[in-house]
Amino acid sequence: MMKRFLLITICLLPLSLLAQSSFTIKGFGKAYKNGDKIFLTYRQGDQLIEDSTLVNKGSFEFRGNFKTKVRGYICRNDNPRFASELFDSIDIYIEAGQITLNSPDTLNNSIISGTPLNNDYAKLHAALKSLKEKKIKDPDKLSAEELKDTALVNLIRAKAQTAYYETFPIQFSFVDKHPNSYVSLLALSQMARTSKYLPRVAQSFSKLSTELKAMPEGKKIAKAILEGKKVSVGMMAKDFIQNDINGNPVRLSTYQNKYVLVDFWASWCQPCREENPNVLAVYHQYKEKNFTVLSVSIDVLANKANWLNAIKEDQLPWVQVSDLKKENEAAKLYGITSIPSNVLIDPSGRIIAKDIKGKELRDKMAELLGAK
């Protein structure tokens, strides 16, 4: 009898390990039209799950199974597999139970409810609503004519960046009040990508549950916090040598007796490329006032041609270096976990600012060297 019990247990074991939970998503929108196509996308490990359905009488429904709770997204009429931009979409948390999305108009104005994580996300979404209602123009939606006006483009990008950072205090407040929510973990994960906020991220991260800290996202945040401590304002800059575009070695310490902005970037990094015109303007304004820039690319050897082309396209006249390794040694030395990133070093070799971009960089240089 015991042998039979053990055999049954062994036979059932794989089934229990593969056990899945089910979810239902129901969406209702007064402005939805019959035939509107709704797409659902989320990940399960390395597998990308994609599903779609049609709106019928102002509503749609998905049913599915999952092993791991995860954040995905739903979009309307734009197939995410091919679309360069999703005009009507909303994030959603895949977890057991019935998830409901009610909207008076578009999908992205839906009110989510029905399961614990989606209820949490609805609270955060509501807290951020006033900021999202500000009429900030999207820099990625400028017309060809607008893109010709460099000053206008820089102004719009600066406003968008300011609006983004205004969400951080609200998100930190939410995280501190919801230390057991996966929503909090993902909010911190996003904010940890901006290294200047890592000290504040560390405060909130310390309050998270042990379970959340042990998740892959939690381990990644912990690593970013640790790396961020390698370099801080007030420290002496760490010296390094890397080759320029012609293969000649360049040592950071040769820039002593100057203000130098060490700028970490890559040719494939769109935010880096968008910040380059701002750095270029600062360079031209202060290059005769004992200031220069040293750019460190984290491009790899296989991407060298793209790196050189990006320098030419963005018309960057200062020295560019890289070791073209999978993990750039200078970036590791400075604890760089996301780009664009930078440190500003004074003539004595001391770091006086970190991760200053846009208007903040312009203001800092005006403070140090005076505006023309």
Image (cartoon, helix red, strand yellow):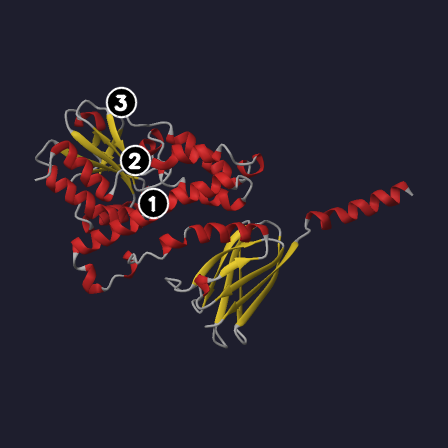
Judge left or right: residue 209 versus residue 164: right
Could you tell me which secondary element the residue under label 1 belongs to? Answer: helix
At 54% from the left and 75% from the top, the residue drawn is 56
Could you tell me which secondary element the residue under label 3 belongs to? Answer: loop
Amino acid at pointer 2: Asp
Asked if 20 appears above or below 319 in the picture, the reply is below
Judge left or right: residue 104 versus residue 155: right
Q: Are marks 1 and 2 in contact (CB under 8 Å)?
A: no
Find disc 2 in the rendering and name its residue: 323
At 50% from the left and 60% from the top, the residue drawn is 111
Residue 355 screen position, x and y as percent:
29, 37
Q: Are marks 3 and 1 in contact (CB under 8 Å)?
A: no
Q: Nearer the viewer, mark 2 or mark 3?
A: 3
Classify the position of the N terminus by image quarter.
Answer: top right
Find disc 1 in the rendering and name its residue: 165
Residue 132 screen position, x and y as percent:
37, 55
Q: Earlier in the sequence, mark 1 or mark 2?
A: 1
Classify the position of the C terminus by image quarter.
Answer: top left
Q: Which mark is residue 236?
A: 3
Any part of residue 352 in sight = yes
Alpha carbons under labels 3 and 1: distance apart: 28 Å
Residue 343 falls in image quadrant:
top left
Amino acid at pointer 1: Tyr
Q: Are marks 2 and 3 in contact (CB under 8 Å)?
A: no
Any part of residue 44 in sight = no
Asked if 338 appears above or below 108 in the picture, the reply is above
